[in-house]
Amino acid sequence: MGVSRVATAEDSRAGGQEETGDPPGRLDRIRATAAGRLTLRIVTGALGAALVVTGLIMVPFPGPGWLVVFAGLAVLATEFSWASRLLEFAKDNVKAATHWLNRQNWFVRIFASALTLLCAGAIIWVSVRLTFGVDLIQKARELLS
């Protein structure tokens, strides 16, 4: 059973089909011309950047914000080596933080969870107040009175 990994920009520039004898794929045919390479880099950059920005906007809210950021970095990593390095750095740090939290006792885990929920609640409260002009805390007080 082998280890699979995502193809990166270095792999595509290394010309992997000479080693395997595989016929060139669609992206290889696009990369065969200078205009095709530039167009592919622009489209990949725009799509990856849009995913990263969308994910960063989604981060404070409940949902898959960080997943979308990592997906955007993965798209960028197919054409840009800096994005591949950044993706590896981010994955390593997320794994390290997850392993650190798993080694902690229950008090630290509960405190980290409560702090995360408090931050998410504060972000949602500020967002609703700035966007709609509604103070959720004041509305809750009115409902409870």
Image (cartoon, rainbow, N blue to C red):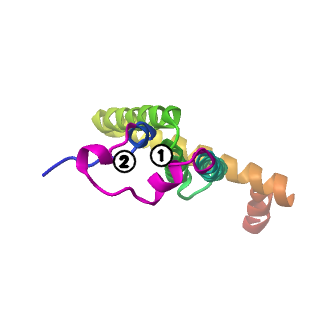
Instruction: Residue 98: give x, y in percent of width and height.
Output: 36, 39
Residue in view at x 53 percent, y 57 percent:
64
Residue 94: quadrant of the picture: top left
Q: Are marks 2 and 1 in contact (CB under 8 Å)?
A: yes
Q: Residues within 10 Å of mark 1 (few under 14, many from 20)?
A: many
Q: Which residue lies under the disc numbered 2?
A: 6
Residue 24: quadrant of the picture: bottom left
Q: Does 66 sit above or below residue 96?
A: below
The front one of 124 and 49 is 49
Instruction: Residue 111: give x, y in percent of width and height.
Output: 45, 39
Decide if residue 99 is in sight here.
yes
What secondary structure characterizes most of the magenta part? helix
Q: Residues within 10 Å of mark 2 (few under 14, many from 20)?
A: few
Q: Secondary structure at mark 1?
A: loop
Residue lying farthest to the bottom in this orientation: 143
User: Does 51 sit left or right of 1 as displayed?
Assistant: right
Q: Does 62 sit above or below residue 145?
A: above
Numbered badge on residue 78: 1
**Type of residue at label 2?**
Val
Residue lying farthest to the right in this orientation: 133
Q: Start and end of the magenta stretch?
A: 14-37
User: Does 114 sit left or right of 16 as displayed?
Assistant: right
**Type of residue at label 1?**
Thr
Decide if residue 134 is in sight here.
no
Residue 145: quadrant of the picture: bottom right
